[in-house]
Image (cartoon, rainbow, N blue to C red):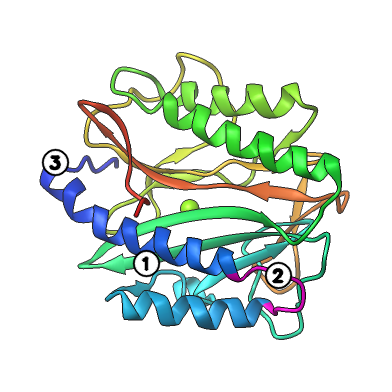
Amino acid sequence: MVKLKTSGEIEAMKEAGRVSAKVLRMVGELVRPGISTLDLDRFAEEIIRMEGGIPAFKGYGGFPGSICASVNHQVVHGIPSAGVILREGDIISIDTGAIVDGWYGDNAWTYAVGAIDPRTQELLTVTEKSLFAGIEQAVSGNRLGDIGHAIQRIAEASGFGVVREYVGHGIGRNMHEDPNVPNYGHKGRGIKLETGLVIAIEPMINQGTHMVRQLNDGWTVVTLDELPSAHFEKTVAITEDGPLILTAE
Ligand code: MG
């Protein structure tokens, strides 16, 4: 069931969005060779709590971290670890979420660790671009498929693979609400987008095959061909004035 939000509720969600965005930016600023993903996680939890939030991911379905830290061919849901040390040439998707006053914010960004392979840099550029193309379609009167179509078109035009098994989602009092928001689809198909719908749009785009598998840890999703994957996400409200990014400072 899709739960539309009032303008007052959307206003209230801005604080969870602000904290989620601030922690993502600050953790991103720490990304460099030599730092472990557990160090990034500890820092993130500290910032979220200092800002008056609760880490949304910690304990979610038993997830141990406050962030998801997915390096190179890891797509999403990487578990922060002292044993994962970033190296020059890596990429890392960091996903952060905060709860404030019972409302959720959720966002992600993929960072380069120093200089990276040019094709992988293209993957980051194109995935970011696809996110904003998807957001542009998040307007009242459009259909859900318009968002996925816009993302898929951009990713596939550059020869990249769109992950199918993991998708964006509605968000509000829960981190995952209806509807699912796929990063692929057909123009004009799917449910009608209405004012008050709040969704996390999050393209997960692979440098090679779109196919993924989950590791035995029960969380980490990796590409089948072990080529890199990028992930960018924002929480977006559909308002009378168009798409409003809630995960903003
Ligand atoms: Mg999400």
Which class describes the residues within 10 Å of circle 3: few (<14), some (14-19), or many (20+)? Answer: some
Residue picked out by circle 3: 7
| Nearest-to-viewer mark from 1 and 2 | 2
9 on left or right of 116: left
Which of the marked residues, 2 or 3, is nearer the chain's N terminus? 3
Residue picked out by circle 2: 32
| Nearest-to-viewer mark from 2 and 3 | 2
Q: Please, is residue 44 above or below residue 205 in the view?
A: below
**Residue 219, percent across and down?**
64, 67
Q: Please, is residue 116 above or below residue 244 in the view?
A: below
Which class describes the residues within 10 Å of circle 1: few (<14), some (14-19), or many (20+)? Answer: many
Say whether mark 3 is within 8 Å of ligand 1: no
Say whether mark 1 is within 8 Å of ligand 1: no
Query: What residue sits 37% from the left and 67% below the top?
Result: 98
Q: Main secondary structure of the magenta part?
A: loop
Extreme residue in the top direction: 188
**Residue 202 among those drawn in magenta:** no
Residue picked out by circle 1: 98
- Magenta region: which residues? 30-36
**In this view of the protein, which residue sits in the foreground, 84 or 1?**
84
**Residue 241, percent across and down?**
23, 26
Res. 198 visible in picture:
yes
